[in-house]
Image (tube, helix red, strand yellow):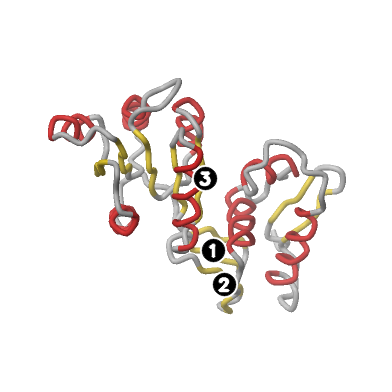
Amino acid sequence: MRILIIEDDNETAAYLGKALREAGHVTEHGADGESGAAMAAEGGYDVIVADRMLPKRDGLSVIEDLRKSGDHTPVLVLSALGQVDDRVTGLRAGGDDYLAKPYAFTELLARVEALGRRRRPGAADTVYTVGDLELDRLAHTVTRASQAIPLQPREFRLLEYLMKHAGQVVTRTMLLENVWDYHFDPQTNVIDVHISRLRGKIDKGFGEPLLHTVRGAGYMIRDSAR
């Protein structure tokens, strides 16, 4: 699953993101209420894990705005406020589940995966298809011409982002920010290396290539037959 973590404590967010990725999920991080709200508004997440008390905007107002916009992405609220009234407030604001801190990661994972199994009206597509290439975000699988293609977590995240923007030019800056969580240029060839590896896995031996380099602009994944 693709999970958005909205958490202002960087250490907590890093731990949670690492643990969720080790469980086979893809994570992205919003460090405050405003950035988290902007990321959530872009859509494409299976579950959102949101701290209640955040700088710039509190977590409940982020959830309320999502619901007003018609976004039904399941949200797990995390909070140090664990009294009954606090939980009721969080659920009435639009949260689907509420977990008080401190929590056991195994319980959080079980709750997140339970939320991810819910099929909600208006939920984002969980399967991306370009030509005969298919990526299932929930099952975390990739196939081409019905042949399974094993990918490393970063390769999966890279392909997912490219397929989400199929037919569009994706710049190096977009990839650095959304796949590597870099908001600066690391001055390395990390993107070139991963694109090369990904191209070798999804294109080599399958006839028409789907992953293209747009010289001077970035990359694009598209069905060459169209």
The CA distance from mark 3 to mark 2 is 24 Å
**Which numbered disc flags the more N-terminal residue, 1 or 3?**
3
Locate residue 75: give its quadrant: top left
Q: CA distance from mark 1 to mark 3?
A: 18 Å
Q: Which mark is residue 143?
A: 2
The type of residue carrying mark 2 is: Thr
Q: Percent x, y for residue 180?
A: 65, 48
| Mark 3: amino acid | Glu
Q: Earlier in the sequence, mark 1 or mark 2?
A: 1
Q: Residue at x 24, y 44 (%)?
A: 97
Report, in whole angstroms, how far the alpha carbon at label 1 lies from the one at label 2.
Answer: 7 Å
| Residue of label 1 | 135
List the residue tagged with mark 3. 28
Q: Quadrant of the C terminus?
A: bottom right
Describe the element under mark 1 as helix, strand or loop: strand
Residue at image coords 75%, 50%: 219
- Which three-letter amino acid code belongs to the residue tagged 1? Leu
Q: Nearer the viewer, residue 116 or 112?
A: 112
